[in-house]
Image: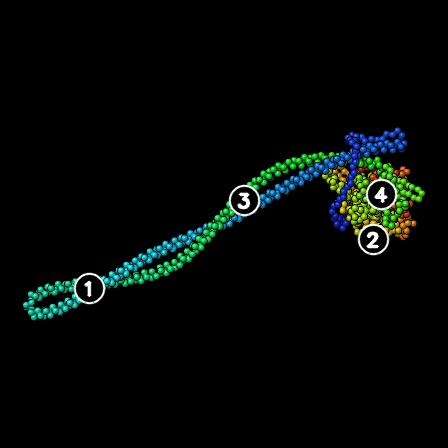
Amino acid sequence: MVGTAKNGRVRHAFSVVNGGQELGPSSAPVSNAGSESGGIEFTREDVDALLNERPKRKDRFSLKEKCETMSEYIKRLKLCIKWFQELEESYLIGREKLENDVEVSERQRDEMGILLKNKEEELNSIIAELRKNYASLQEKFTKEELDKMAAMESLASEREARLEIERSQNSLSDEHGRVQRELSSATQKITSLNDMYKRLQEYIASLQQYNSKLHNDLSTVEEDFKRVEKEKVSMVENLSMLRGQLSVSRQTQDDAIKQRDALVNEVASLRMELQQVRDDRDRHKLQVQTLTAEYTTYKESTEKSSFEVDNLKSKYTKLEVRCLSQTDQIRTLKDQLMIAEEKVQMSNLTTLETRTEYEGQKKLISELQTRLADAEFKLIEGEMLRKKLHNTILELKGNIRVFCRVRPLLADEDVSTEGKVISYPTSMDALGRGIDLVQPGQKHSFTFDRVFMPEISQEDVFEDISQLVQSALDGYKVCIFAYGQTGSGKTYTMMGQPGDPDQKGLIPRSLEQIFKTRQSLQPQGWKYEMQVSMLEIYNETIRDLLAPNRSSSDMLRENGFGGKQYTIKHDANGNTLVSDLTIVDVRTAKEVSYLLERAAHSRSVGKTQMNEESSRSHFVFTLRISGVNESTEQQVQGVLNLIDLAGSERLSKSGSTGDRLKETQAINKSLSSLSDVIFALAKKEDHVPFRNSKLTYLLQPCLGGDSKTLMFVNISPDPSSAGESLCSLRFASRVNACDIGVPRRQTNMRPPDSRISYG
């Protein structure tokens, strides 16, 4: 919303003015009051007829008849307003009840949803944990089964190895037996061969003996032959016979020689066989020794394998025990899983019941929301009717209303009961509206729209003007200003005491109400944009309190040393324009509070004999409100002017000199011009001197136009200030008697580059 005006004035965003600081939202409660209507009911036709009714008088110039007619009309309007307030209160109560029912139902639904979610999460966590445990146990069981299978396989392989060893041992034993048998048979064969060799040697010896015998016989024969030769003749026959015998003997010898050769050959073969048998025996001995060593090794490995088999058997026994225990655990976990599944089934049933109940609650909530929408529609209609009635009653009460506020006595102003100059009538007609000021020998009575005693709090004061502040959001121009002498509590009424939330003045409370109401109207389709400007009129010079980088040199230039010249102009629509004035777009009450604090530091104050910190200028705060309703396409434009006037003072009491004297003269001159304007308005003169001062010219739309105006007259109870208090009360009484016209609601949207208006 930052734009440039046609005359060169620049509108600044809030972040530019406050040095880039952004503040959060703030709000304050709004007080509303209601009353009994006495059982009277009105229809829309009755209300329209009552609003459109025009009083008929026999004599137009009879003020008494006019007052009676207006009093009667106001009584009927009050009854109508009381009835509407009661109806509005019942709507609000019904709406609050429906909202509470909706909240309770939603809370129950949320609680049931949370409970259901927690239950599901708990069951899911239990199931996940059980599944995790089951998976881990299944994994352990699988691992144990694998270990068991590996152990069984190793055991089977050991058994097979053992059986193989036993088979090899048996085969070795058989081989050893066979070798032993072969060895024994070979030994027997060797023994038999030795016996045969001995027999052959004996036979050879016998043959040798026989040969020697034969040789001996031969020699004997030869000797006999010789002897026979001698007896040759005689022995021829014997010789021939002997030759036959000799041939036989030779044949026998040849047979014996052949037999001997055969026997020698057989002995040689037997010797070869014996040598072969001996070689076989040696080879078999080596085989026996090798087999014996292998047998010893196999025996040792068999003993070791037996030990390992025993260990494996013990491990197998332990694994079987462990498997049995894990089987029991798995069986227990399966039982727990079945129980958990049963619980899940039960929870599913509970969930179904809860969902059924949730659906019922949902239907109830939809019905309640429908009723709530109807109530909101009725509330919107009632709000529109309330605005119309409220603005009508304010118009009937008068455009310029006057509230009087008396500040408490200060510590150095302690006055006895006899010395009090302010009193309050207790009659029914003047209760809460009348004030009496007593001067020596004379009592002055005044009646205003409202009189606030010293003990009245800031909140109670604001409660009486809250509806007037609401009119700014409804599209009206509203002006509230504080008037009174120096030290009477004007700044306290408008600004309050900084740092104390209970002592906040009308300006911060009005802003909190506006921003809170803006937020509450958003559901009805209203959207608002707001702009703020602040200025002071010091020595008849306008100062921009929100100008960026404001310094002392700027203040000197504004005092007439070459600074900006702010000019006031009024357009045909009754809007007041101040050229080159800084305008800030605001979104929250805290942003405005920051700007107020900044403006307070820039405002001109000084010390006098009447006040330690006296305001030496007129402070004007303006809030421009532009609203649009997207649902009804209704547009409004309102202005809220909150003004803290400088205090009137007498030079004899304030003791002002130098710059303070010039300030006092300028203040008294502007307030005197304001008094002249009020007198002219009260007398209905043709010419009203608005241009006599910057203050009256700036407030022209508020005093003589279509604005709803309220003046706070602040009074000091100090007896030494009785004269000035009397002047203030008389001036306020004249203001209360002014008739400045009928307020007009602004329904046209302001162009984006238009300037803010005072009025």
**Which sits earlier in the primary sequence, circle 1 or circle 2?**
1
Q: How far apart are marks 4 and 3 (CA)?
A: 79 Å
**Which sits earlier in the primary sequence, circle 3 or circle 1?**
1
Foreground mark, 3 or 1, reads: 3
**Label ID, residue 336:** 3
**Which sits earlier in the primary sequence, circle 4 or circle 1?**
1
Foreground mark, 2 or 3, reads: 3
**Label ID, residue 457:** none
For disc 4, the neighbor class at 10 Å (few under 14, some 14 to 19, many from 20) is: some
Looking at the rendered structure, the kind of residue marked 4 is Met
Q: Distance between the residues labelled 1 and 2?
A: 167 Å
Q: What element carries label 2?
A: helix
Q: Is mark 3 on a helix, strand or loop?
A: helix
Position of 43 compared to 162: left or right?
right
Residue marked by disc 4: 453
Q: Which of these two is toward me, 666 or 503? A: 503
Looking at the rendered structure, the kind of residue marked 2 is Ser
- Give the residue drawn at x 16%, y 68%: 212
Residue marked by disc 1: 203
Q: Which residue lies furthest to the right in this view?
A: 441
Q: What element carries label 1?
A: helix
**Which sits earlier in the primary sequence, circle 2 or circle 3?**
3
**Label ID, residue 552:** 2
